[in-house]
Image (spheres, coloured by chain):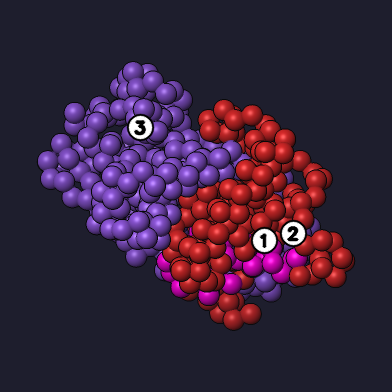
C-alpha cells in the first residue's frame, strides 16, 4: 500500500483517467477476440482497469495505450490458465451474450458470409498469432507498440504477423473453396 | 533492391513501417517486377479481407462499470489526508467491493505521478480536448459531411472563419464540427474519420504569420501534429498510426492552401 503515501503530494489529472477510459473499446475488442465470448472479455477488461490503477506506479511514461493493452492481454492469458482447470477448451469461441459490432463502410459492404468466414479463420489461429492480427488490423498499432504489448522483440512480432497472415490466407482460400 | 529483399520487407512496407528510403527503393523495384507486384497485391488483399471481421465494441454496461470504479478511485483521492473514514464513505454503494476499492483508491494517488505530458501544455490540452469529445459523446455540434454546411455554422459563433475542406476522396471523410476551448483559445474543431478512428483538427488564429513549424508528439497512444500557416494554428490529434496521420496532415495542409 505504498501508494497511500503519495496521496497528499499530487493531483489526479482527470485526463489521465479519461485517457485510460478512452482505450476501453480497444481493450474490449482485444479481450473479446482472445477470450472468445463477451462475458469473460468484460471481466478481463474490468479487472485490467483495477490492475492499471494498482500498477500505475509501474508505468514509466511512453505509450499509455500500449501499456494498458499489455495489462489486458496478460489478463486474458491468466484467465485462460485459470479456466484450463475447468477443462474448457483453450481460446475456443463460445457464443453467449450480445455483441455490439461497429459497422464501417468496409464492413457494411461485405456480405455477412465473408465476415463470418474471416471471423472463423481468425479464431482458428493460435492466441499468439491472433493477438498480433487484432492489434495490427483492428487497432493499427505499430510494430513497436505491438512488441511492447505482447512482450516480444519486434522481429518476433514481424514473423508472427507474417505467419499469421499466411495461415489466414490459406484458411480463407480453403474455406472459400469448400462453401 | 532484389526480389529477396522485397520478399523480406514487403509486409513492413504494406504496414507502413519502412523508412522512406527503403520504401522508395522497394517501390522502384516493385514497379518493374510483376512477381513482386503480385506479392504486394496478395498482402493487401488479405489485409482488406481481414478488415471485414467484426470490431467488438465495449458494451455500455461495461463502460458504466469501469467508470464507476474509476470515479470511486479519483473522487476519494482528491481528499487531502489519507483516509480512515474511507470505508464508511464507500460502504453504502460499494460495500462488497470495498477492499478492492481501497486498493484502487490508494493507487490512484500514484496514477497522478505518471509524468503527465513531457510536451507542452497545448499538446496536453489538445489530447484532453480529443478525449473529452469522444468520452462525453459530444463529438460534433454540427454533424455534416458537407463543408458548405460546416463552415457557415461557425460564423457568429467564433471570431474567425476556419477553412473547412473535405477529404472524403482521400479516405478521410468530414464528420462535422464543434466549438471547443483549447489552452485558452476558442477553437474551431473539425472532426474527420478514418475507419474506426476519429481525428480532431483544432484551428485558431495564430500570430506567427506564415511560418510553418511542424511538431509531432506521441503520448498515451495519441499522436499530435501541429503547424501554423497563413495566420492559423492547426493542431490535429488522433489514435491513428503516425504515418497515416502525417499523410492526413499533408493532404489537409495542401487542401487548405489550395
Task: Choose top left, top right, bottom left or bottom right for residue A178.
Answer: top right
Q: Which residue is mark 2?
A: A91
At horizontal 57% and vertical 44% (from top left) the residue drawn is: B50
Mark 1: few/some/many CA within 10 Å (<14, 14-19, 20+) = few
Q: Is residue A138 left or right of residue B250?
A: right
Magenta stretch, main secondary structure class: helix
At horizontal 28% and vertical 58% (from top left) the residue drawn is: B1
Q: Is residue B144 left or right of residue B182?
A: right
Image quadrant for the C terminus of chain A?
A: top right
| Residue B56 appears in the rendering | no
Task: Choose top left, top right, bottom left or bottom right for residue B53.
Answer: top right
Between B205 and B134, the residue placed more toward the observer is B134
At horizontal 50% and vertical 69% (from top left) the residue drawn is: A156
Range of the magenta residues? Answer: A55-80
Marks 3 and 1 belong to one chain: no
Q: Which residue is mark 1?
A: A126
Q: Is residue B192 left or right of residue B93?
A: left
Helix, strand or loop for disc 1: loop
Q: CA distance from mark 3 to mark 1?
A: 36 Å
3 vs 1, front mark: 1
Give yes or no for residue A170 being in the magenta stretch. no
Mark 3: few/some/many CA within 10 Å (<14, 14-19, 20+) = few
Image quadrant for the N terminus of chain A?
A: bottom right
Chain rendered purple: B
Between B212 and A121, the residue placed more toward the observer is A121
Chain rendered red: A
Label number found at residue B170 = 3
Give yes or no for residue A71 being in the magenta stretch. yes
Between B255 and B91, the residue placed more toward the observer is B255
Amino acid at each position: 500500500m505504498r501508494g497511500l503515501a503519495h496521496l497528499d503530494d499530487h493531483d489526479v489529472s482527470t485526463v489521465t483517467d479519461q485517457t485510460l477510459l478512452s482505450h476501453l473499446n480497444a481493450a474490449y475488442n482485444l479481450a473479446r477476440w482472445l477470450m472468445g465470448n463477451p462475458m469473460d472479455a468484460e471481466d478481463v477488461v474490468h479487472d485490467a482497469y483495477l490492475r492499471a490503477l494498482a500498477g500505475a506506479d509501474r508505468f514509466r511514461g511512453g505509450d499509455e495505450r500500449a501499456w494498458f493493452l499489455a495489462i489486458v492481454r496478460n489478463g486474458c492469458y491468466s484467465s485462460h490458465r485459470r479456466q484450463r482447470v475447468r477443462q474448457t477448451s483453450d481460446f475456443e469461441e463460445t457464443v453467449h451474450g450480445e455483441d455490439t459490432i461497429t459497422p464501417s463502410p468496409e464492413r457494411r459492404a461485405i456480405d455477412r458470409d465473408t465476415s463470418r468466414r474471416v471471423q472463423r479463420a481468425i479464431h482458428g489461429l493460435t492466441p499468439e498469432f491472433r493477438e498480433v492480427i487484432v492489434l495490427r488490423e483492428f487497432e493499427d498499432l505499430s510494430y513497436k507498440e505491438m512488441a511492447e504489448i505482447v512482450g516480444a522483440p519486434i522481429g518476433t512480432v514481424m514473423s508472427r504477423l507474417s505467419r499469421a497472415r499466411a495461415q489466414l490466407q490459406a484458411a480463407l482460400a480453403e474455406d472459400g473453396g469448400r462453401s | 533492391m532484389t526480389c529477396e529483399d522485397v520478399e523480406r520487407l514487403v509486409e513492413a512496407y504494406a504496414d507502413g513501417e519502412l523508412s522512406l528510403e527503403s520504401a522508395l527503393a522497394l517501390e522502384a523495384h516493385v514497379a518493374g517486377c510483376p512477381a513482386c507486384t503480385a506479392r504486394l497485391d496478395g498482402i493487401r488483399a488479405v489485409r482488406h479481407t481481414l478488415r471485414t471481421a467484426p470490431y467488438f465494441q465495449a458494451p455500455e454496461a461495461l463502460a458504466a462499470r469501469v467508470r464507476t470504479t474509476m470515479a470511486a478511485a479519483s473522487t476519494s483521492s482528491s481528499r487531502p489526508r489519507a483516509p480512515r473514514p474511507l470505508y464508511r464513505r464507500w460502504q453504502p454503494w460499494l460495500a462488497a467491493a470495498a477492499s478492492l476499492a481501497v486498493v484502487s483508491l490508494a493507487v490512484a494517488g500514484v496514477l497522478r505521478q505518471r509524468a503527465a505530458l513531457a510536451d507542452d501544455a497545448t499538446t496536453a490540452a489538445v489530447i484532453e480536448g480529443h478525449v473529452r469529445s469522444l468520452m462525453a459523446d459530444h463529438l460534433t455540434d454540427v454533424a455534416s459531411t458537407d463543408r458548405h454546411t460546416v463552415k457557415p455554422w461557425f460564423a457568429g459563433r467564433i471570431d474567425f472563419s476556419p477553412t473547412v475542406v473535405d477529404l472524403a476522396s482521400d479516405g478521410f471523410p468530414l464528420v462535422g464540427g464543434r466549438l471547443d476551448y483549447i489552452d485558452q483559445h476558442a477553437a474551431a474543431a473539425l472532426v474527420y474519420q478514418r475507419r474506426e478512428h476519429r481525428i480532431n483538427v483544432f484551428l485558431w488564429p495564430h500570430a506567427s504569420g506564415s511560418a510553418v513549424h511542424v511538431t509531432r508528439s506521441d503520448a498515451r497512444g495519441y499522436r499530435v501534429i501541429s503547424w501554423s500557416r497563413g495566420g492559423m494554428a492547426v493542431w490535429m490529434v488522433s489514435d491513428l498510426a503516425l504515418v497515416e496521420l502525417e499523410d492526413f496532415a499533408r493532404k489537409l495542409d495542401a487542401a487548405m492552401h489550395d
